[in-house]
Image (cartoon, grey):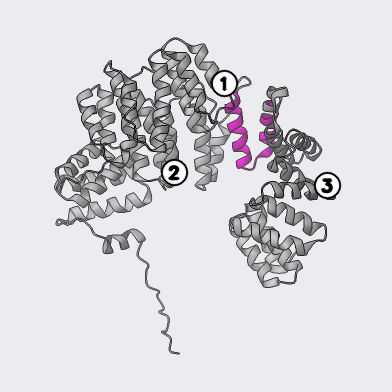
Amino acid sequence: MLTRKASATPPRRLAPVIVALLIAPAPALAAPGDLAAYARARVAEADGAVADAARDYAHVLADRPNDTVLALRSYREAVRAGDDALADRAAAALAAQKALPSDAALLALASAAHDGDRAAATAALARLDGDRLRILAAPLRGWLALDAGGDPFAALATVPDEPVARRFAAETRALLLVATGRVDEGLAAVRALGGDDLAAFDERVAAARLLIGQGKSDAARALLTEGAGALRIEPRRAAKPTLAFGAAHLFTRVAADLAAGDAGPLTYTLLRAALRADPGNDRARLLLSGVLARDDALDAGLAVLDAIPADSAYASIAATGRVQMLAEAGRDEAAMAALARLTVAPGAPDGDVQRLADLYMQLDQPARAVPLYKRLVERAGERGDWADWLQYGAALDGAGQWPAARGALERAVALGPDEPLALNHLGYALILHRERMAAAQAMLEKAAALKPDDAAIADSLGWALYLRGQAARALPLVQRAAMADPANAEIGEHLGDLYWQAGRRFEARYAWTAARETAAAPDIARLTGKIDRGPTE
């Protein structure tokens, strides 16, 4: 077979963005300056430099306002960057070409709500009818009716017969009951919504702000202290029952559901609209910062966090969020510097203590997490549950305080005898410390039966079987765990050890090499040694 001789100078690869510029449909730009600005905008957009991208799109759009492709790109990047002037200008250009995206109505509504322009708000709401965003129309009309002194509940009766639409209408009805002074009925409706997730807690925070606005701070505090509370914050600003408040809350509520996935145009529009309607909406800022960071726009996300004032109820969450965002982006030095500035006062709320302790564990500093988890356990007293003791025990174990850790983990299992996580952690820790091996294996078998699809539990049980001389039973479990969680370096290393023991040396080295790609720095040298020489034990 003939082969081409390799060139002494390999061809230079084109950056993906430049390739896209060459092959993708682009605006018909004539002037060289326009083309250069457009190219800069596309590159900046891909690099997450959202402000730079918006600036260059604005320059090109000024010269070519009738170009639909350019106007749409300008609109999307303006929303992402929070450039309201450019977003409105691009939206106007798209409207003139009858190409305006439906979500632009949310920004128009937000501006009208903020300005108290009910006529403009009504017109914006009409654009939602018959569109995919119609599920938001009835709740928004309810707030608009209340804002205008009308009957908000009549508007809610127009909700489409769709599960999501009915859910948003039920949440809005609960808040409207509180807003109209039917407090007992409203709080009962809030509680009836159930759940202990972020959405449920955001609903309670919104109700609490309305209560504070009515001078009912004690009722607000009582509402927020029921259950664990996902964010565990206490709002410091009252809320007036206006369209601006209702729209901002609803947009943030929907965006919170969407933000867990990949960032999309609608998520950005909802969050920017929430901030237009209520510029003090720090919950929206928290969500927006995370969305930007996951969308390769970390610096823009950090800038959004900077806008959360020190006296905000969300300030401590923003501070820990900054560390987490930096760490996840691989900016370890900056993350550690930001972490070093974080403290919690002796009387700090449990939520602040919890977040900082969790952050220490995430950044592999369990010794610093131990006193914080201990504080939470002691505060909880008899109310403490298995999860409180599990996290305390895990921190003690990570900090090298095994006897104390064993006691805490045993307490976790005693409080949660059928909790797979507690069983797995104690069982695996006992196996690693070579204590009560038979009992540990029994715990892990029970955990696996309770949660058969959990990769970590399957790996723990497989490792226990291996250490107890049952390699044939262990291998399929660890193989399954590695397939379910291929980025887990510990599971990958276990798989390599099992392959080696079975005489499958090539597969062992392959597994260790894969594990090394995602391993923490202290583990890389050990894995390299195994790849080169095999296990030393």
Q: Amino acid at mark 3?
A: Ala
Residue 101 figure quarter: top left
> What percent of the width, then of the height, locates residue 62?
16, 44
Q: Which mark is residue 225?
A: 1
Cβ–Cβ under 8 Å for marks 2 and 3? no
Regarding mark 1 in the picture, which secondary structure is present there?
helix
Q: Using the numbered discs, state the Cα–Cα distance from disc 2 to disc 3 in whole angstroms.
A: 44 Å
Kindly report the secondary structure that dominates the magenta region of the rendered protein: helix
Is residue 211 among what the camera can see? yes
Viewer-side label of 2, 3:
3
* Of callouts 1 and 3, the N-terminal one: 1
Quarter holding the N terminus is: bottom left
Q: Looking at this view, name the residue that lies furthest to the bottom.
A: 1
* Of callouts 2 and 3, the N-terminal one: 2
Q: Which residues are magenta?
A: 348-375
Which residue lies at the image location 42% right of the left edge and 39% below the top edge? 301
Q: Is residue 261 above or below residue 314?
A: below
* Disc 1 crowd, CA 10 A, few/some/many (<14, 14-19, 20+): few
Q: Which mark is residue 439?
A: 3
* Disc 2 crowd, CA 10 A, few/some/many (<14, 14-19, 20+): many
